[in-house]
Amino acid sequence: MKKTLPLPKGFSAAGIAAGIKKKKNDMALIVSDVTAVSAAVFTTNQVKAAPVKWDIQVVEHDGARAIVMNSGNANACTGVQGLADAEAMAALAAGRLGVKPLDVFVCSTGTIGKPLPMEKIAGGIKSLFNEASPDGGMDAAEAMMTTDLVSKTVTAEIDFDGKPARITGLAKGSGMIEPNMATMLAFILTDAAIEKHTLQCALRTAADMSFNRITVDGDRSTNDTVICLANGQAGNEVITQNSKHWKLFLQTLEKVLFDLSMMIVKDGEGATRVITVRVSGAASNGEADEAARAVANSMLNKTAWAGTRPNWGRIMDAIGYSYAQVQENKVNIDYDDVPAVRSGVAAGTPEEHLVAAVSKEAFTININLNLGTGKAVVYTCNCTEDYVRINVE
Amino acid sequence: MKKTLPLPKGFSAAGIAAGIKKKKNDMALIVSDVTAVSAAVFTTNQVKAAPVKWDIQVVEHDGARAIVMNSGNANACTGVQGLADAEAMAALAAGRLGVKPLDVFVCSTGTIGKPLPMEKIAGGIKSLFNEASPDGGMDAAEAMMTTDLVSKTVTAEIDFDGKPARITGLAKGSGMIEPNMATMLAFILTDAAIEKHTLQCALRTAADMSFNRITVDGDRSTNDTVICLANGQAGNEVITQNSKHWKLFLQTLEKVLFDLSMMIVKDGEGATRVITVRVSGAASNGEADEAARAVANSMLNKTAWAGTRPNWGRIMDAIGYSYAQVQENKVNIDYDDVPAVRSGVAAGTPEEHLVAAVSKEAFTININLNLGTGKAVVYTCNCTEDYVRINVE
């Protein structure tokens, strides 16, 4: 029996094949029955795809009704034509809803530099509106997939003093994607009533602790987008940063985003292990982050973790060339709670204990620089020959 | 018949198996008959191996007589014991020459975090001095190899107004190396007479245009070292930065280092193509360098170049997230002289012409940011499944 994805009250969704990709679902739609409060975070890449440029205008605007997305074509590096196509895509969906184009978010992922096939997009939007239903969540999640091996959905329930609400997240992403590059997309839907700036603050905070903490290959796409729609259908008292339910909402949102981001790391192209890199004792939080990312993005570490060798020398090397201050003779490293390095040299733990620690499906590397109070955590995956195969083909 | 490597006048060399690695030559020696002027450049990694710390003292010291190196053990992250072992290694060679330990450079490459096997090192040094001869250059070059598939040597002749001189270079390096990590080592020998600070300036300049322009996997080792010995046996007038032969010497040195560095890129672990990334029109030279390195180190680009797809979208993506300022609609990209991108969008060149351009064994990616006059060049190789296999095993 097919898995179902419970959507929050007042949301419908659909996923269909518009013919942009061969024989695969390639378009998804999410619609709110009423105008929703929206928030979003976007790629920091200076080269931004046309839909990202469009969505920046949508989120600055007051409300939103829908998200329409396609895979197979990123509508990036497509110039003036690309911007016109993104707007047309929004306008086609807006026409069906009787709203303005700026009430509709659009997302694209796939090949860069080719014009969107607008006839197929138009046909797809028509089908999406015919199919959309409160039970269409899984179809939408599956249509978002590109090299993803599994669809990524999370749903969480909240009780606001007797008013039940829900946060549901749909995401895609597993490293960069054939044939040109790709993207992390996440749509977060909730029927909670929340003030717009409060929602933006919550989304930014939750994204910083989740999507911004994971790294598969260190590349940032031109299309990365996280959109949150809150339609207020739960009927709770509108949440602001001073209100009683702010913390509960934020914590639940954080959990939804964190769970989605872990699904992306686990589904990293060719990945077989999830590695948590925790740095403490750095001169600042920023330096801890630099050190953790240097370790997590080092191809030498990522390939070492594909074998079952401790290779702590590659960790010492990576923190040494990071922008973080490092004093070799102060560094301690543990795999989970197994000491590997003490004061910059081998801790003396028998090799087989270290091998056992790094042979687990998931483990944590704890690095203490012993210089200050800065700390950071980054989640990553290992790199196998399959990563290269996927990205070459 | 075995290839021979002509050494400059007054130099001897040897390469032998000391038993540090199984069944492979693992130690090399280079000796000058007389005290040589020395210069060196070292890794910028904050975590420096013990031999690097030792060599920094040697090069600050007045003259030098020898270089002794081992593979199979990096003597890195070995604490106080490691420093004592590096000094002992120098002292053993110095004893044979009747000079001070500070007259001897030592280099190590191989596993991190394990103490040097000093008995084997001592036996090896004894054998090296028994074997050393003016014909031992190739043996030394071969003993330097780790995952290198070919030994890397270059020799060039100079005529200083009837006084013939020679510059000979030996190098190793092909990305980072099993089982822990590795290293770029290069020994540059010349019989030219040159003043010490002039030699240091020449070496730094030449290294900046060669070894510092190549990137295989973006990792910098704890042991990277380039040492130059100039023993003056050619009998030319001592070269200074104001003297007649300065330019000729510098140009020849640059060529030797450039040729060695290209050999390293070609021998990149699992690599099958050499790619030159040239950025112009950046806001500054520094920004051009940042953009070029972002492109050259992107795993998405390196894997794309393993296939035969142009994938210029991945290049746009990489410059977009680099620290260089980029205005998407000003960017032009060419593969050799085939236009791929004009003003940030597809140039309209037929796909098969782009495919032909990136199918060559070596090609240049020309990126013009059209913002200023900054420029930079970086040389790199593609990344195949073999790179991962080598680094996992």
Image (tube, coloured by chain):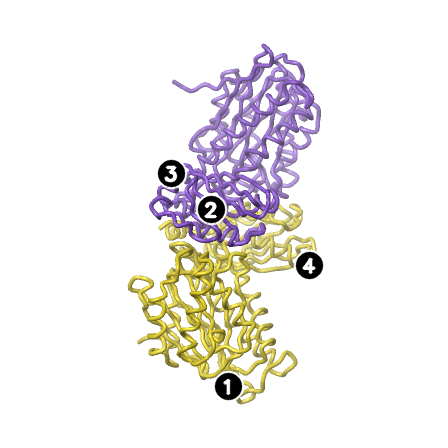
Chain colours: A purple, B yellow
Total marks drawn? 4
Tag 2 residue: A333
Mark 1 vs mark 4, foreground winner is 1
Tag 3 residue: A360
Q: What's the amino acid at mark 3? A: Lys
Mark 3 vs mark 4, foreground winner is 3
Q: Nearer the viewer, residue A175 or A247?
A: A247
The relative height of residue B262 versus residue B8 in the rendered view (above or below) is above
Mark 1 vs mark 3, foreground winner is 3
Q: Secondary structure at mark 1?
A: loop
Q: Which mark is residue B234?
A: 1
User: In the rendered structure, the residue with mark 2 lies on which chain?
Assistant: A
Tag 4 residue: B373
The residue sitting at 38% across, 54% down in the picture is B179
Q: CA distance from mark 1 to mark 4?
A: 42 Å
User: In the rendered structure, the residue with mark 4 lies on which chain?
Assistant: B
Left or right of residue A152, residue B284 in this image: right
